[in-house]
Image (tube, rainbow, N blue to C red):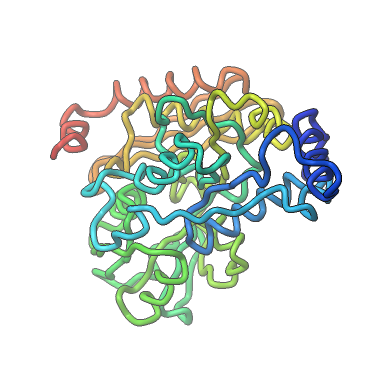
Amino acid sequence: MNAPVLPSEALQRVAAEAVRRSHAAEPPTGRKLPLRVGSRASPLALVQTRNFLTRLTRFCPVLRDMGAFQEYQISTEGDRNLVQRLAEIGGKGLFAKEIHEALAAGRIDFAVHSLKDLETNLPPGLVLACTLKREDARDALILRDRDVKVDPQHPYDCLPEGALIGCASVRRQAQMLHVRPDLRFCLLRGNVQTRLDKLRAGACEATLLALAGLRRLGMEDRVDVVLEPDQMLPASGQGIVGVTVRESDLELRELLSAIEDPEARAVSTAERALLAELNGSCRTPIGGYARIENGVLKLSGMIASEDGTFLLRREIEGAPLEAARLGTELADELRRDTPAHIFDEMRRP
């Protein structure tokens, strides 16, 4: 159950300003409204942004009724270019580049992101101010032939010899190839519906999607197999929505603190520290997944070769307050036990 949202002083000030705007006899003062919330224009991004606004306005409906917030859709290079791997055109930061340019320039006040698509090192002057409660972090296997029998313990056995898998993630590709080296892969990018349409049209035998996105879109019924973390280690930040703001905007940072989820902050800090320490990018087969059990943060990390012939997993645990240290320490262990040529492959042009 989500914790109740408590009205911070910053949130109260925004609400008061919204009320003042509704009275013509009293001119607006203070921060200019509406506050502009930047988002990618994909259906999933918009659902996540609207869920964020719902969460933010839950305790005070006047914020919604008075139009205190305005959605601002931004087209990104990562969304426009669907024919190349992200690694070939600049990395997953391309899902945030134009959004963060608008944030830095003051054209928007917040930016809402899928945390797994957010670069580990943010542009100067911007901060990750808020992380929302995590949805299910697991990956889902989606099959074209939905009549095939699937063994959840051995989910890849349902795929025919040499099956073509639509995939844009080297993390997913490496883990599947480690189990099924006969599989073939083709590039499949685009929003969730686009990928499902291409699968249905016969572009491939199967694809993989984040379960969190399918749930948020109300499309969980399209899932054929939910892959457990020991079968497919998720991407760092998967299932978490993060909100960035200008570092200097202390009022908005205070406002967002009212809806911060402490557990999401702790696990994402560990996962992002792991990724940052390994210089992880979209061309790097790295997985990171943390959870808190009985007050203990448990972090699993994975590094692999793109062809799946090498795959190493390690785990670490400790106090949630030590999340960043745990991520860095686990990354050091993974690097120490990984052959140097694996990193050389990752750094190749």
- Residue nearest the viewer, comparing 124 with 193: 124
- Residue nearest the viewer, comparing 164 with 239: 239
Kindly give the residue lying farthest to the left in the view shown. Answer: 349
Name which residue lies at 53% across and 43% down: 108
Name which residue lies at 75% across and 35% down: 29
Which quadrant: the C terminus?
top left
Give x and y (percent) for residue 137: 55, 48
From this view, report whether residue 188 is shown above or below residue 314: below
Give x and y (percent) for residue 255: 71, 33
Asked if residue 183 shows in the view, the reply is no
Name which residue lies at 64% across and 29% down: 253
Quarter where residue 256 is shown: top right
Quarter where residue 208 is shown: bottom left
From this view, report whether residue 324 is shown above or below residue 44: above
Name which residue lies at 41% across and 40% down: 101
Quarter where residue 330 is shown: top left
In the rendered view, does 3 fall on the left or right side of 251? right
Asked if residue 295 shows in the view, the reply is yes
Give x and y (percent) for residue 86: 28, 50
Question: How many numbered circles are shown?
Answer: 0
Give x and y (percent) for residue 117: 43, 45
In the rendered view, does 229 fall on the left or right side of 308? right
From this view, report whether residue 223 is shown above or below residue 305: below
In the rendered view, does 254 fall on the left or right side of 338? right
In the rendered view, does 149 fall on the left or right side of 21? left
Kindly give the residue lying farthest to the front in the view shown. Answer: 25
